[in-house]
Image (tube, rainbow, N blue to C red):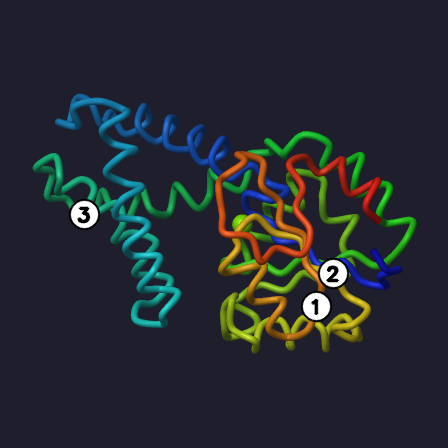
Amino acid sequence: MKNYKHIFFDLDRTLWDFDKNSHEAYQEIYEKYNLYQRGVSSFEAFTKSYLRHNDELWALYVEGKIEKSYLTWRRFEVTLLDFGIDDPELARQIGYEYITISPKKTNLFPNSIETLEYLQQLCSLHIITNGFEEVQFNKLRNAGLDKYFDKVITSEAAGCKKPENCIFNFALEKANALPTESLMIGDDIEVDIIGAQNVGMDTVFFNPNRIAHNGGIQFEIFDLIELKKLI
Ligand SMILES: [Mg+2]
């Protein structure tokens, strides 16, 4: 690997353990709003339904077809409807509650801090994340990650989302970085890796669950600590 001046990290599912943190937040919501008593059959059924609707709505949001505010509560409204609960007001409350609770969770992938401590001695570190400005900044602050990053680029601030060239170019400009001296690290091949490659950045695919893929990957790691050997 060459000597990079800038390393750009994805946040969710790369440093911040999105699945573990979200699961904890769903659990709190499930209990606080007595969803079982209201007719939701089980916590597992609730999360399964929510994740399906969230994926569908998130895809529409990424395509620019729906607004952030709508996504925030609509995903809970349709989840509740799956259990015969027609209560838009409750969905709004839960939607707001979720984006309040979830960023307070602080589970990180193993060795995140040790790796960032090491890398920040070598080059400038930045974040490029598809997410809401306030939510992503709160996550970074609460998890004690903010001090490692020079620039934090959210899709909300950039006005476009990974894998579009636009957000990577926006991030490079903000960081005063050239693509040839920059490395992108992320867990999503389509969004992080191909997106960054399209603007000429080198890439590391973080694959903690060892999912199968078709190759075409420049570098791949299974644990963040491997970056200490690579870079
Ligand atoms: Mg990610």
Task: Compare marks 2 and 3 and give the one earlier in the sequence.
Answer: 3
Determine the image quadrant of residue 194: bottom right
Q: Residue at x 63, y 64 (%)?
A: 153
How dense is the environment of label 1, judged by Cα within 10 Å: few (below 14), some, or many (20 and up)?
many
Rendered-image quadrant of the N terminus: bottom right
Q: Is residue 129 above or below residue 80?
A: below
Task: Compare marks 1 and 3 and give the one earlier in the sequence.
Answer: 3
Residue that lies at the very extreme toward the right in this rendered image: 121
Task: Compare marks 1 and 2 and give the one earlier in the sequence.
Answer: 2
Residue labelled with disc 3: 78
Element type where label 2 sits in the image: strand
Q: Position of residue 128 (x, y in %)?
A: 62, 61
Residue type indicated by callout 2: Leu
Inter-mark Cα distance, 2 to 3: 39 Å
Element type where label 1 sits in the image: loop
Q: Residue at x 50, y 68 (%)?
A: 161
Residue labelled with disc 2: 183
| Ligand 1 lies under 8 Å from the Cβ of mark 3 | no
Is 70 left, or right, of 206 in this rendering? left
Q: Is residue 62 above or below residue 83?
A: below
Which of discs 2 and 3 lies nearer the camera? The answer is: 2
Residue labelled with disc 1: 201
How dense is the environment of label 3, judged by Cα within 10 Å: few (below 14), some, or many (20 and up)?
many
Residue type indicated by callout 3: Val
How dense is the environment of label 2, judged by Cα within 10 Å: few (below 14), some, or many (20 and up)?
many
Label 2 near label 1: C-beta < 8 Å?
yes
Is 57 left, or right, of 106 in this rendering? left
Q: Is residue 151 above or below residue 211?
A: below
Q: Position of residue 116 (x, y in %)?
A: 79, 43
Which numbered marker is on residue 30? none
| Ligand 1 lies under 8 Å from the Cβ of mark 2 | no
